Image (cartoon, rainbow, N blue to C red):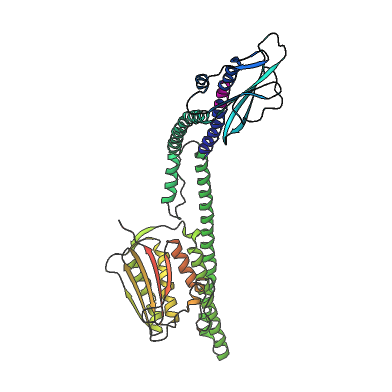
Amino acid sequence: MPLSALWLLSTAFAYFTSVAFANDTYDRELLNSADSVAVRTSHKGGQYLIDLPSYVRSILRHDNTDSFYYQILSPDRQRISGDENMPDLPKNLSLGVPQFSDGLMEGTRVRVASILVPVPEPEIKGETFIVQVAETLKARQRFAQELLVSMVVPEIFFILLGAMAIWSGIGRGLAPLKDVQEALLRRSQHDLHPLSDESAPLEVRPLVYSINELLGRLRSDIEAQNRFVANAAHQLRTPLAGLKTYIGLLQGFAKAPEVDQAVTQLDHGVNRMTHLVNRLLALAKAEPNAAAILPRQIFDFNDVAAASTSDLVNVAISKDIDLAFEGSQSPAMVEGDPASLSELVMNLVDNALRYTHHGGHVTVRVLAGDHVLLMVEDDGPGIAEEDREHVFERFYRVLGTGEQGSGLGLPIVREIARSHRAKVVIDTPNSGIGTIFTVTFKRHIG
C-alpha cells in the first residue's frame, strides 16, 4: 500500500511536470511563429504590408496535426490581416514581453501568443503594432502523454521490482519468526515449557524471552494452586474421615431412639459434606489451569471406561438398575490423563444411576471411528431442552427430581472434556425415553 501510494503521487507529479514541460516547449515554438509573422510585416506610405503566403503559413504550422491562426492589429487594435474571431487580447501588453493565454477558436481550445512589435521604419518612431498567433493543442497534448508514459512505465517497473525485493526480504527475515509461530501452534494448552530461541532472529528474541517468562509464571501459579488443592484435600478429608469414624462408634453406643435418629441424620449430613468436598476438589483439579500440568499419556479408552463403570456396579445393584458396558471392537486410543477421564466417566454414570428409576437401564458405550465416542444412555425422566445447557452450570439442579446431589457432577464433566479438547452433547435416545450423553474425543492415530 505505501508503494502504491508513492506510485500514485509520483505519477501525479510526473503528469503535471510533463504538461508544464510540453507547454513551455510549444510556447517557445509559438513565440517563434509570432516573431516570424512580425518579421514579414512592413510599413510603407502609411500602410502595413503583409508578406505571408500560404506556403509560409504551412511552415509556421509545426505539423499537420494542429491548426494555425494569426492576426495583425494596428496600434488602435484594428485588424489589418489574418483570421477573424481570434481570442481577446490581453489587457496590458508591453514591448518585448510576450504574453500567453488560452482561448477558443471555432469551438476548439487553442494556445495564444501575443506580442507588441515596433514599426521597423526609422521615420516612424514609437509606433507599434500587435501580432497574435494561436494553434490548437493536439500536438502538445500528445507530446505530454508520450512524455508521461516514458516516465510512468519505468516507475511501475521499478516499484514492482522494489515490492518483490521487499516481499522477499521480509519473508526471509521473518522466516524464523514463523518457526516460533508454528512451535506455539503445535503445542497443546498443557505444554508450558519454554520456547527455544536458537532459531529466532535477534529482533524477535526479546519477544521469545517475554513469552518464556510468562509461561514460567503461569507454570509457577498452576503448581502453587495444585499444592493448595492437595493440601486442602488432605486437611478436609482427614477431619471428615475422623468424624465419620466417631459417628460409627456413637451409633454403637446410642440406645435411645431419639439419639439414634439424631446420629443417623448427622451421618447423612457428613456423607453429603464428604461428597461435596470430593466434588469441589475434583472440580478444582479438572479446571484448565490445574489440568495444564497433569501428565498426558496415550491409552485405550475402553479400559478406563470399563473400570470406571464397574466401580459403580454396587450402586446399580442397590437400585435394581441394569448397568451394561459395551466396548468398541477396535482400540479407542486417546491422549490425556486417565485419572481425569475416569472421573468423567464415573460422574456421567453416577448421574445416570441417580436419576434412573428402580428397575431401569443404564448403558455405557465406547465407539471408535474417526473419533472416539463415549455414550451414557439411561431410560430415566430425561432433561428438558431448556435445561440442557444449564445443567453444566455449577450448583444448578433440575427441580422436581427428588434426588440429592451437589450440582457439581456435570460441571466437572465439562471441565475435564474441555481440558481434553472434547465436546459434550445431551440428546434424547431413539426410543424417545431418557437421556443420552455423548462425549466426542479426538482419536489418536499412530
* Residue 202 screen position, x and y as percent: 49, 35
Residue 97 showing in the rendered view? no
Q: Which residue sits furthest bottom?
A: 257
Q: Report the front residue among 237 and 279.
A: 279
Q: Report the front residue among 360 and 203.
A: 203
**Residue 315 image-quadrant placement:** bottom left
Q: Report the front residue among 61 and 284.
A: 61
* Residue 301 screen position, x and y as percent: 34, 66
Q: Which residue sits furthest top?
A: 122
Q: Which residue sits furthest front?
A: 45
Number of numbered labels in the structure image: 0
User: Quick one: quadrant of the C terminus?
Assistant: bottom left
* Residue at the image position 48 percent from the left and 64 percent from the top: 286
Range drawn in magenta: 22-28
Residue 166 covered by magenta stretch: no
**Residue 270 image-quadrant placement:** bottom right
Q: Which residue sits furthest left?
A: 329
* Residue at the image position 50 percent from the left and 49 percent from the top: 215
* Residue 131 screen position, x and y as percent: 63, 21
Residue 409 showing in the rendered view? yes
* Residue at the image position 46 percent from the left and 67 percent from the top: 414
